[in-house]
Amino acid sequence: MAAAAPRPGGGRRTVFWNDPRVRAIFAQTVVLLLVIAGVAYLVNNTIANRERLGVASGFDFLRQVAGFDISQTLIDYDRTFSYGRAFVVGLINTFYVAVVGIVLATVIGFLMGVARLSSNWLVAKVADAYVEIVRNIPLLLQLIVWYFVVLAGLPAPRESIALGEGAFLNIRGLFLPKPVFGEGTAIFLAAVGLAVIAVIVLGRWARRRFEATGQPFPVFWTALAILLAVPALGYLLAGMPISFEYPKLGKFRISGGLVMLPEFMAMVAGLSIYTGAFIAEIVRAGILAIPKGQWEAAQALGLSRGQTLRLIIIPQALRVIIPPQTSQYLNLTKNSSLGVAIAYPDFFNVAGTINNQTGQAVEVIAITMAVYLSLSLTISAFMNWYNARMALVER
Amino acid sequence: MAVRQQTAAARVQPPITERVTVLAWLKHNLFSTWYNSLLTILVGYLLYLVLVPFFRWAVLDATIAGDSKAACSFGGACWTLVKVRLGQYVYGLYPEDQRWRVNLALVIAALAMVPLFLERFRHRLTYAVGLVVIYPIVGYALFYGGWMGLPVVETSRWGGLFLTLVIAGVGITASLPLGILLALGRRSEMPVIRSLCVAFIELVRGVPLVTILFMASVMLPLFLPAGVNFDKLMRALVGVALFSAAYMAEVIRGGLQAIPKGQYEAAMALGLGYWQMTGLVILPQALRMVIPGIVNTFIGLFKDTSLVTIIGLFDLLGMAKLIVTDPQWLGLAAESYIFAAFGFWIFCFAMSRYSQHVERRLSAGERR
């Protein structure tokens, strides 16, 4: 009769609908079927709606003539180019504003983050006020204020504000001298490349020497000297190939030179000041995360304040700073799509115009989403790589 | 720049005489070294350059009297605009004689939320869930009307701060439960559910909110069968809720990951099922841990509501923009936007202070 006794540890045999594995398979099947059914329903509706509205489908429209102008084009473009080209122009404009914005936001953020920790009461309070005000006002509102209030208050072309030699600021934008690359530019560029390579080699050598003998080498100043002297020498040897085309102040308009549109300036100002406030917080938190013992140990070793910051604190703080910094860069890039509110021709703005003209909403949205997704993935991949380089190497 | 390290070190051993004179304070905090003095003078001068003209414009030379632009003298700010149009900043184009309905709903909301802050009230969670389900129905009935003789007010007339609060409120209440489900799904052991959640979260987080709002307003009509039409506000609400749910999910996942494995094992050893374990053991700890992150997401959401301006709704920013275009009040963009900015700032600043307060209280508990 031993067979009738309950098996030790086994308990009753579970009924099959109580088996977690069966349940998991069942739940997943149901969810999957629901999702497939939902998607099929939406796709079906979409196809029916598009047939009813007579909208073309497919990506053939990319080759059609766009027929609209874009106010800022960094590559050749006018209204006779294709929709595909217009997308590329918009994408380049997004890149342009994002890169300039990221650089400025990083500079502002680091300055303000360190300023918030300053022992100078006034400096710390000003930085505090900056962060608390800017962080708590929507970016869109700030962009609108920059564009419609601050930059709209600039003078007309005739009363342009002159900023030194050959640079003007007025309601049409910021006009700067435009470099013209003449013959022999290649020699100059080669000199620049040479200088960069020399600096990298020098850095490696100095590091190896430092690790082998403990003797430091003034890398920064030497590198600066090389970076300035070699290109300058190349420039002279090539016979000064680069000249500047200055903007000319006409009666109604300014011709020539390099133009930064007010839309672009408003975007850069808004994005970098807004993101800078978040970066300042990240930098402050990063520096505060370094234990006090690190400062004291550095002091005990006889390092100066600057050396302590440069050699001990910042390398460690960067580890804390980089991951949240990445998401700020991502946010800035995504936020550049708000350019649509102030007529900056970024990718989203161009896509909106194309959608209005062709009516192919599904394709346009698909392209838009794909572009922003790949932008996000690219930035986070790059920052992950950088983060891995900076991360703590443990034995 | 000097970092506040010495002051921290000095705090360990307080000076024998605690009497701090003004001069000593100045010397210590503003003029401790030559470069600090230089910095103080430079920053002070810049502040003087910016703040004095602004103060003169915004306060000294400003006008608030009168009820038309003619009352404003040149040079100063014309707050008369804000005074005259205050109702529109707050209620949008909601009919003036019906505004009491909005006020009533706000009062009900404030009163209904009181028990949530009573520490002694035991059933706060049940109450909160009930509130989240019932209040939107009450609010919608009051705002939209169409019953008991209340005239219907179309959603296209909702606007101003009121609309901002409606969108933010709906976004907040919808994104929290959705975010919890997504976060749990992302950590689920079932591959299908996990990949669906990961795909949704990463897709939404990878694109800007504008594209989602745009998609909601352009694509939704395409997705639905002919004849079915959603209200513009409803589409924006769906977009905002889905967007913030994805961000909320990532914040909550952080909390879930911080729960030690032992908690799961102990709950299972007690014989709790998945939902009991999650609801009674894991989530209460995980959510408490990420309250600051949740509030920060709320702040982001509150600011992001301003993007509905782009798809043609008139929230606080949209109203400020609309009022600027009024031919009777041309040229007063600065006043209008500054007022709107102040409105947003108050709410976001209050929320961030609250989050800092909670953070301090939580870390105080951990310090023992």
Image (cartoon, rainbow, N blue to C red):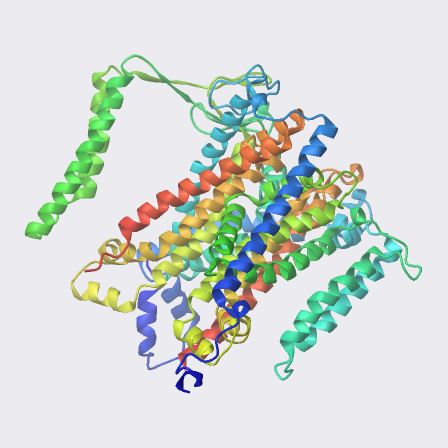
x, y percentage for residue A147?
Answer: 60, 37
Q: Splitting the image into 4 quarters, where does residue B330 fall?
A: top right
The answer to which of B154 and A14 lies nearer the viewer is A14
Give the image location of residue A274, x and y in percent: 51, 48
Q: Is residue A157 above or below residue A285?
A: above
Q: Vertical placement of B42 versus B289: above or below? A: above
Asked whether residue B75 is in view, the answer is no
Q: Quadrant of the N terminus of chain B?
A: bottom left
* A165 left or right, relative to B323: left
* Farthest-out residue, left: A213
Asked whether B246 or B49 is in front, the reply is B246
Q: Nearer the viewer, residue A1 or A135?
A: A1
Quadrant in which residue B144 is drawn = bottom right
- At 38% from the left and 80% from the top, the residue drawn is B18
Placement of A269 over or under B172, stated as above or below: above
Q: Quadrant of the C terminus of chain B?
A: bottom left
Q: How many numbered callouts?
A: 0
Q: Residue furthest top?
A: A183
Q: Nearer the viewer, residue A183 or A119?
A: A183
Residue A44 seen by the camera: yes
Residue A325, horizontal then vertical, whole percent: 41, 50
**Residue for point 54% across, 52% down:** A134
Query: Residue reaching furthest right?
Result: B149
Residue B169 percent coordinates (x, y): 67, 59
- Whether residue B246 is situated above or below residue A98 in the rendered picture: below
